[in-house]
Image: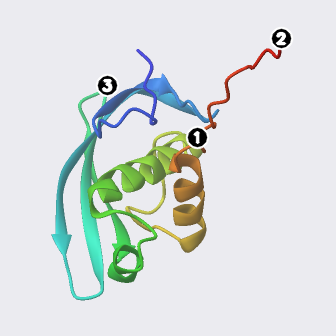
Amino acid sequence: MEFDCRDRGVRCSGRAHAGGCSLSEKIVVQYVSFEAKLLLREYTFAVREASGDLREYKVTIENEAFVSRKVRYQDGAYVCCLRLHRELAEAANHPAASRFSITDTELADYKTATAPKPMRSFQMNRKDD
């Protein structure tokens, strides 16, 4: 089964990442919770491999990013899920670290990728008789 991180669900399983990286075996990434701390929000994910092994990962976003509207509160878990999928794909499902922080560059890329497309103005074709 394939997953597409562009889908809004934070529970994904599969072998191929829509962005081009590939995960080495079937896994399930599940959002568990978040904790609002003084300077950041910490999102916790559980990753289960086909073998049944379960690992926990934490991905953080600084509170300032939400306050300055670099990312919406409701998108926080999704942005972190995308980062975790990238880390898993790049390290054959076994990244050396279990904690990651979202950078300003990642937030800018996310905002650009999800920005609404400009509306085309409607123009009637007029025929002059």
Q: Quadrant of residue 30?
A: top left
- Which of 117/45 is in front? 117
- Above or below residue 64? Residue 109 is above
Residue drawn where x is 56% and y is 30% of the image = 18
Q: Position of residue 23 (x, y in %)?
A: 51, 32
The amino acid type found where label 2 is placed reads Asp
User: Is label 3 in a helix, a strand or a loop?
Assistant: loop
- Above or below residue 47? Residue 75 is below
- Left or right: where does residue 122 sit relative to residue 27? right
Q: Position of residue 6 (x, y in %)?
A: 46, 35
The mark nearer the N terminus, 3 or 1, is 3
The amino acid type found where label 1 is placed reads Met
Q: Are marks 2 and 1 in contact (CB under 8 Å)?
A: no
The mark nearer the N terminus, 2 or 1, is 1
Name the residue tied to disc 2.
Answer: 129
| Quadrant of the snapshot with the C terminus | top right
Q: Local crowd at mark 1 within 10 Å, few (<14), some, or many (≥20)?
A: few
